[in-house]
Image (cartoon, rainbow, N blue to C red):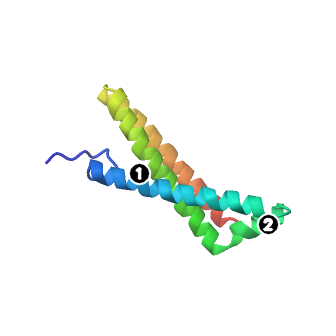
């Protein structure tokens, strides 16, 4: 069996499941934030700070950030695999994306836990 080291998962089925699971996490996070904004009156800095200072919200936010990065990586990998035929260019683009994703993850962790 041939495995691809650039794929996030071990197979297409695994990538499919990871894509759907990350989409569910992102949908739940979005619905929660929209509901909070809709039902929190008045929506002030103190309300947002209180929300994001709570430990469950920090964990939920980091989970959503990780889900977003997984979702983006699978999508970028599929697009690059399908449309960029030059292996060296595809490798460079994947490397740039991975470095950018880790930078986003690091800054997200610093921002969320800095509240």
Which residue corresponds to the image point at 82% horizontal and 60% vertical from the top-left?
Answer: 43
Residue 47: x %, y % from top left:
79, 66
Q: In this view, does 41 lie above or below 13?
A: below
| Residue farthest toward the left in the current orientation of the protein | 1
The percent position of residue 4, horizontal first and vertical second, equals: 25, 45
Per the image, label 1 sits on a secondary structure element best described as helix
- Nearer the observer, 17 or 114: 17
Marks 2 and 1, the one that precedes in the sequence:
1
Circle 2 crowding by C-alpha within 10 Å: few under 14, some 14–19, many from 20? some
**Helix, strand or loop under label 2:** helix
Of the numbered discs in the image, which one, if any, rests on residue 19?
1
User: Is residue 80 visible to us here?
Assistant: yes
Q: Say if mark 2 contacts mark 1, CB within 8 Å.
A: no
Instruction: Assign the C terminus to one quadrant of the image.
Output: bottom right
Label 1 Cα neighbours within 10 Å, binned few <14 / some 14-19 / many ≥20: many
Residue found at x 59% / y 62%: 61
Residue 108's quadrant in the figure? Answer: bottom right
Question: In the image, residue 95 lies at what x, y percent?
Answer: 41, 40
Residue nearest the viewer, comparing 54 with 35:
35
Residue 9 seen in the figure: no
Relative to residue 97, is residue 50 depicted above or below?
below
User: How far apart in space, not on screen, are marks 2 and 1 (Cα)?
Assistant: 32 Å
Residue 81: x and y in percent read: 33, 34
For mark 2, what is the residue?
Answer: 47
Up the image or down, 100 lies above or below 66; here it is: above
Q: In this view, does 2 lie to the left or right of 112?
A: left
At 52% from the left edge and 62% from the top edge, which residue is drawn? 63
The structure residue drawn at horizontal position 64% and vertical position 66%, both measured from the top left corner, is 113
Extreme residue toward the bottom, this view: 55
Q: Which mark is residue 69?
A: none
């Amino acid at each position: 069996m041939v495995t691809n080291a650039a794929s996030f998962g071990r197979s297409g089925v695994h990538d499919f499941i990871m894509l759907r699971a990350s989409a569910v996490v992102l949908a739940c996070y979005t619905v929660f934030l929209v509901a909070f904004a809709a039902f929190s009156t008045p929506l002030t800095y103190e309300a947002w700070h209180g929300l994001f200072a709570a430990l469950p919200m920090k964990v939920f936010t980091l989970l959503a950030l990780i889900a977003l990065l997984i979702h983006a990586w699978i999508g970028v990998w599929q697009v690059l695999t399908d449309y960029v035929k030059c292996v060296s260019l595809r490798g460079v683009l994947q490397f740039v994306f991975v470095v950018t994703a880790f930078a986003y993850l690091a800054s997200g962790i610093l921002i969320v836990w800095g509240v």
